[in-house]
Amino acid sequence: ATLMIPVCLDERGNWSGDDERFMEAFSRIRVEVNPGGGGFVPRIDGPIVGYDTNRTSEPGQSHIKLLVHDDGVRLNRDANVEALEGTDAEIARRVFGEYRDVISSTRIENTPAASGRDGNRAVRRGTHMQLLRQLARRNDMHACVLPGSRPGTSVGCFQPTPFEGGDLPELVLLGRQRNIDTFNLQFNAQRPSTVRAASLSLEDKTVVERRSRYRNVELVGDAPPFESDDEVGSELLAPGTGDGADVQQRVDSETRRRSRAYDASGKLRGICYPGVLEPYRRIVVQMGGTRGSATYVVQRVKHSLDRSRYVQDFGLKSDSQSEAGGAGSLVPGGIF
């Protein structure tokens, strides 16, 4: 998060407002948002890690921009080399457990044991957060730290998308319930693929080969862009990508990741949207009688707040579209 703090000159020509104790390095800041449709939703809770100051002789134009990170910054400060044993989920629990002073709870999805005889393992060459992101990627998961329900309590997550939780209010482009200003949708027909990989056991020199099936991907929506494996490309993972983990899980994860061929972006209309968008959550988009009216997963959100407006810029992803393009036009007669 970035926070803009205005500063000005006092009667003696000294700058005031830039030495508050809450602005000191590693002081904690928590930001919650309530657009009027419910309770306050925490967006970030963590330490100040830096600032950028801008001073000018023009009145009312000087400010300090504070940079705030979530508690994941604690996991990303110390690099080391370390060998770890166990499934990826067990390693994630062990890593988050070393930061109990700020990460009070975890949401971790179990991962399967390695299919080879060498067992599960991982080598950390960097920070703990870099390790978690490496493990998350090979399982098509997300490793992140989210703000908890109370100040000073964060949640360590190692989960597949979409995250569990109630669905967000629908995004509507047309009609009386409209709450979107813009909605841009892109489709990449080259992304969906079947995936193959192989792993060599160092213990007995056996080779484990696995293959995924595009048609077996569990969709977030109704209809995939392609019906069979014959219509998509194929990918061969680089040697070693399945080492230390289950090879079938690795190829299935890569197939799911590549199946998300739909990318959307847009902007919400101020406080017309009754909710607060959160990454990795499921959301339904209604954009009229098109196949783009479908279920998506929120990939990113930028919340911009000042004294007069609240804007949510979003990015969505999906692996499917609606079967019939919605139940008809959402535009009441006489509007256009």
Image: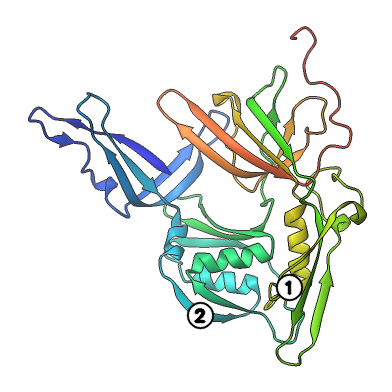
Quadrant that contains the C terminus: top right
Which is nearer the eye, 149 or 246? 246
Residue at left 66%, top 59%?
A: 141
Q: Nearer the viewer, residue 193 or 324?
A: 193
81 horizontally vs 106: left or right: left
Decide: is 136 above or below 117: above
Identified by mark 1, the residue type is: Pro
- The percent position of residue 129, horizontal first and vertical second, equals 51, 64
| Point 70% across, 24% down: residue | 173
User: What residue is pinned by disc 2?
Assistant: 82
Tell me the residue at 69%/84% (across/down): 119
Task: Name the image quarter holding residue 213.
Answer: bottom right
Tell me the colour scheme of the image.
rainbow
Where's the N terminus, which quadrant?
Answer: top left
Pointer 2 local density, CA inside 10 Å: few below 14, some 14–19, many at least 20: few
Amino acid type, residue under disc 2 in the picture = Glu
Q: Which mark is residue 112?
A: 1
